Image: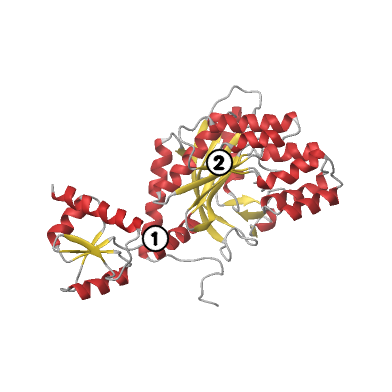
Amino acid sequence: MSRAPVDGTRAYLPDAATARRGYRRALHALYEAWGYRPVEVPALEHYDPDHPRADQSFKLSDTGGDVLALRSDVTPAVARLVRGAWPRLADPGAAPHPVRLQIDATVWQASRPEIERIREFTQVGVELLGVRHPRADAELIHLARESVRTVGLEPRVEIGSPGFVKASMDAAGVPAVARDAVARALDRKDPSGVDAALRAAGATGPAADAVRAIPDLYGGVELVDAARDVATSDAAHAALDHLAGVLAEFEDARELLLDLGMARRLSYYTGVTFRAYTVDYGQPLLGGGRYDGAWLPYAAGFSMGLERLRAALDARDATHPAADVVALDDAGARALRRAGVRVARAVAGDVAGARAEARHQRAPWLLVDGAIVPAEADAETAPEAAADRARLEAALEAGDA
C-alpha cells in the first residue's frame, strides 16, 4: 500500500495551517459584520447526473447500493438546505426576503480541477438569496473587494454582464448549438475566434458586428456608455441599465473594471458576474455572480479558493521585501516601528554587514546614526526612491515625536 498522499491532496505544516486558519477567521468576521450567518452542508450527497459538476464528482456506493458523491460544488448543497429551511425562497412569487449565508467548505473534484493537480480544495464565500436588485449585486461586489483587502492583498475587481452578452447573441441570431463556441472566444478576447464562430453560426449583419465588438468593451466604468452604442436590442439595453444601476451603488468605483466580454458559464449566470484579482498574480482569487433560476428563483454569491489565495500571497512575498529598513540604530528603529514602518535590526555591527543583510532581505534602505541611506551604496536616485526616502524620514521624525 502506498504511503504517499493521494494525488491532488496535500497536508499543511504548522505555519501554513496557522495562516489558513487566520484567513478563514478574518473572512468569517468580515462576513459576520455584513450580516452573513454561517451554514454547514454535508460532504456526502446523492449522486445526481444533472449536477453541473457530475462529470467531476468522486462517486461512491453505500451498503444499500445507493450511489453517492463527494461534494464537488457548495452552491447546490446550500440550495437544498435553503429550500428546506426557507421554503418561501423557492417561491418566485413570494415577497423579496433577503437571506445572507456564509460558507466555508472543502470540495473534491476528480477531474478538470480548478487548480492544476489539486483535487481537494477549500471554498470560503457568501450567498445572498431571495432578492434581485442592483443593490444586492453591488453588495456582493463590495464584499468581494473587501474579502481580498481583508487577507492583505490589493483588490482589483472585473465585472461582466452575461445578460448583455446573451441579448447580443439573441439579436445576432446565434443558434443555441453555436453559443458555447462564441462565448469561449469572447471570454478569451479572441476577435478572430469570435469572427470564425459567428461565421460558422451563419450570423451576419449589424447585430453580428455588435457581437464582434464585445471583446473591446474592457475598461473603466464609463464603458457602459460605449456599450450602449454597440447594443442593438432592447434586451441588451435593459442588461446595461441593470449594470449601470449596480455601478451607481459605488461611491468610489476606481478599483472596478468592466469586462463585457466575460462570458464564462453563460447558461448558468443570469445577471452581473465578477472576478477579483490582485496585482502581480494573473489568476482570479474569487469569482461569482447572479444565477437566478439555476437552483433558486433569486440567488447570487461568490467564493474564494484558499489554495489560490495562498499562491497569490506566496507570489507577493517572493517580490516584496521582508523589511523596508535594516537598522544599525536601535532608537531610530523603535521610532520607525512606532510610525508603522517594518524595520529589521542588523545583526552585523557594521555598515558593510548591514548592507549584506539588507540585500538578502531585499530591504531598500539602511538606518545608520539617525539617517536613512540607500542599502546599495551605488543605488540610483530615482524620483520614486527619493519620495520613499522622504516618507521614511518623515516617519522617523513622527516616531521620535
The x and y percentages for residue 79 are 60, 39
Residue at the spot 67% in from the left edge and 54% down from the top edge: 188
The extreme top residue here reads: 95
**Quarter of image, res 16:** bottom left
The x and y percentages for residue 151 are 40, 50
Residue at the spot 51% in from the left edge and 75% down from the top edge: 4
Would residue 66 be seen by someone viewing this image from the given angle?
no
Residue at the spot 16% in from the left edge and 74% down from the top edge: 350
221 or 169: nearer the viewer? 221
Q: Which mark is residue 220?
A: 2
Label 2: few (<14), some (14–19) or many (≥20) C-alpha neighbours in 10 Å: some
Counting residues from the start of the chain, the first of labels 1 and 2 encountered is 1
In the rendered structure, the answer to whether residue 181 lies left or right of residue 107 reads: right
In the rendered structure, the answer to whether residue 311 lies left or right of residue 76 reads: left
Q: Which mark is residue 43?
A: none
At label 1, which amino acid type do we have?
Ala
Label 1: few (<14), some (14–19) or many (≥20) C-alpha neighbours in 10 Å: few
The x and y percentages for residue 146 are 44, 42
The x and y percentages for residue 109 are 61, 59
At label 2, which amino acid type do we have?
Gly
Marks 1, 2: nearer the viewer:
2
377 or 198: nearer the viewer? 377
* Element on which disc 1 rests: helix
* Element on which disc 2 rests: loop
The extreme bottom residue here reads: 1
Q: Which mark is residue 17?
A: 1
- From this view, report whether residue 194 is shown above or below residue 359: above
Q: Quadrant of the N terminus?
A: bottom right
Would residue 151 be seen by someone viewing this image from the given angle?
yes
Q: CA distance from mark 1 to mark 2?
A: 38 Å
Asked which colour scheme the image uses, the reply is secondary structure
